[in-house]
């Protein structure tokens, strides 16, 4: 850590609805804008921090700055009616209970439980629900450690927002690392564990070690890779350099690698600016030095990164710094989706333009891809077939592994933003997998 050791530690300061006006930069914003932030953040989770505010946001370009949009709620994320309702209650200084009632009603309208995650992906063993595990694709099991269900800042577009505001009926979270080991032992088809959240790297290194060490020591079943899904390299790079337990974290990564397991840090970078500060680049170098591989993924989001040059830059910078572009996702149809949505056709054109301007080393990226109930569906092309304009779609992952790499066709639609807005291309009544998917749903004991 010779070079990195010169950086002064930075104490982490989280900002939320409760204390954001204490921040001296935010405090200089026009009063109306501050009030809008306070109003919209009654409905959506709001959390940012001193690094994002001081180093990432361009305060000369508010409210349009993409990094401002990334963590600060803005007025148009709510429909006008809903904004006015909340704003009125706040202006009247309405009782907390009344405010919460209204807020809950608005939240419930915003599709807070998309893609049947809880109903279909949580395994049941011997009649017991394996809280904290999701197993959708044979080879990869997701694990949600209960202490890793928060983040250093919240992305305004995050599809896990219901969890952060406490309306998810069952939280996907477990504090039981033994359960994961037992599950992997019983499921030899699983080669990859993806530890996710929230953000698992928000946890102390000591806690994270409690989950990872048993995997290193026991190598249950056919485990060969551990992945950690995180945005900490973007939101709090000090985590890898000057935090109290930075060294412990990097040693833990090394131990995983030295044990013979593959370690992939699945990093969420939304915008090239997140890789600009020297501290952010050094954080990435520290991770890579442990022998871990860094793969990068993010959704394409209006107001934040709906631009081909931006994506091309993002992938080029990632490759230059030693990371591997992995997925461009379509944002899920939940929360402030009307504000953030990018139609499938536009996302496809942005991806294609960016992809065609970078070298093969960047073209490890796949997308744009939708994570739907049936699987990960790639917008693979737009074509004219028998005088009909169609989307060529392709399963990257399928709930049934036989669907993987299978192509299918949907009627072209300029405005469609999600698979449920698409229709089969050639007069079929449904897509090839739909009947089978219904059967799978019917078999789930807790599917409603
Ligand atoms: C994306 C995803 C994975 C991992 O898929 P890969 O294509 O292997 O990266 C696993 N489980 C779920 C539920 C996912 O959405
Ligand atoms: S870092 Fe990830 S989990 Fe946290 S708010 Fe952003 S997208 Fe959601």
Image (spheres, grey):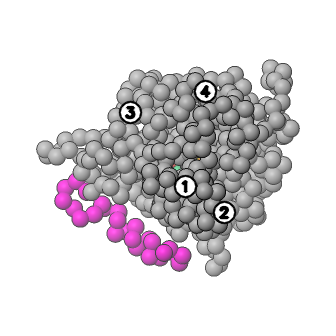
Mark 2 or 1, nearer chain start: 1
Residue at (72% x, 25% y) in the render: 279
Q: Say if 395 sits above or below 119 in the image.
A: above
The earlier-in-sequence mark between 4 and 2 is: 4
- Label 4 Cα crowd, 10 Å radius (few <14 / some 14-19 / many 20+): some
List the residue tagged with mark 1: 88
Give the foreground label among 2 and 3: 2
Q: CA distance from mark 2 to mark 1?
A: 13 Å
Helix, strand or loop under label 1: helix
Q: Label 4's element?
A: loop
Circle 3 residue:
350
Task: Tell me the residue at 82%/35% (across/down).
Answer: 11
Q: Position of residue 445 (x, y in %)?
A: 53, 78
Q: Is residue 290 above or below residue 74?
A: above
Q: Which residues are magenta?
A: 424-448
**Dot placed on the residue nearer the N-terminal end, 4 or 1:** 4
Q: Position of residue 293 (x, y in %)?
A: 64, 36
The image's mark for residue 96 is 2
Distance, label 4 to label 2, CA atoms, is 32 Å
Query: Which residue is nearer to you in this view: 102 or 6?
Result: 102
Residue 406 is left or right of residue 190, and the answer is left
Q: Assign the magenta stretch its main secondary structure.
A: loop
In the rendered structure, the answer to whether residue 446 lies left or right of residue 378 reads right
Q: Identify which residue is drawn at 69% across, 46% down.
A: 16
Q: Residues within 10 Å of mark 1 (few under 14, many from 20)?
A: some
Image quadrant where residue 56 sits: top right
Secondary structure under tag 2 reads: helix
Give x and y (percent) for residue 398: 44, 57
Taking the image as drawn, is residue 283 in sight? yes
């Amino acid at each position: 850590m010779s070079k990195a050791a010169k950086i002064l530690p930075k104490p982490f300061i989280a900002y939320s609805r409760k204390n954001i006006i204490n921040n001296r930069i935010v405090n200089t914003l026009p009063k109306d804008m501050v009030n809008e932030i306070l109003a919209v953040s009654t409905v959506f989770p709001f959390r940012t921090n001193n690094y994002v505010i001081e180093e990432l946001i361009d305060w000369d370009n508010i409210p349009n700055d993409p990094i401002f949009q990334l963590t600060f709620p803005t007025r148009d994320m709510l429909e006008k009616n809903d904004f006015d309702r909340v704003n009125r209650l706040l202006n009247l200084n309405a009782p907390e209970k009344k405010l919460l009632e209204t807020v809950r009603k608005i939240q419930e309208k915003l599709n807070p439980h998309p893609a049947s995650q809880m109903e279909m992906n949580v395994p049941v063993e011997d009649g017991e629900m394996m809280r904290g595990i999701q197993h959708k694709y044979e080879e990869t099991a997701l694990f949600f450690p209960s202490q890793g269900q928060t983040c250093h800042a919240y992305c305004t577009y995050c599809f896990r927002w219901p969890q952060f505001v406490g309306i998810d009926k069952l939280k996907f979270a477990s504090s039981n690392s033994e359960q994961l080991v037992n599950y992997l032992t019983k499921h030899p088809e699983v080669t990859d564990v993806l530890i996710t959240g929230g953000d698992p790297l928000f946890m102390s290194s000591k806690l994270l070690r409690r989950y990872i060490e048993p995997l290193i020591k026991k190598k249950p079943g056919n485990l060969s890779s551990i992945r950690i899904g995180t945005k900490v390299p973007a939101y709090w790079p000090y985590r890898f350099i000057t935090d109290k337990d930075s060294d412990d974290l990097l040693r833990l990564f090394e131990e995983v690698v030295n044990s013979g397991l593959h370690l992939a840090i699945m990093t969420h970078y939304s915008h090239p600016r997140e890789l600009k500060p020297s501290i952010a680049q050094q954080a990435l170098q520290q991770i890579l030095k442990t022998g871990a591989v860094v793969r990068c993924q993010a959704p394409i989001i209006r107001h934040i990164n709906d631009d081909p040059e931006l994506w091309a830059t993002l992938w080029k910078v990632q490759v230059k710094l030693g990371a591997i572009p992995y997925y461009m996702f379509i944002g899920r149809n939940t929360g402030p989706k009307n504000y953030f949505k990018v139609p499938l056709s536009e996302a496809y054109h942005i991806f294609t333009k960016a992809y065609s301007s970078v070298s093969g080393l960047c073209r490890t990226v796949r997308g744009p891809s939708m994570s739907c109930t049936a699987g990960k569906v790639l917008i693979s092309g737009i074509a004219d077939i028998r005088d009909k304009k169609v989307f060529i779609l392709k399963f990257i992952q399928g709930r049934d592994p036989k669907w993987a790499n299978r192509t299918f066709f949907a009627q072209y639609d300029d405005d469609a933003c999600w698979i449920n807005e698409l229709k089969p291309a050639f007069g079929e009544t449904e897509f090839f997998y739909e009947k089978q998917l219904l059967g799978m749903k019917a078999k789930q004991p807790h599917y409603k």
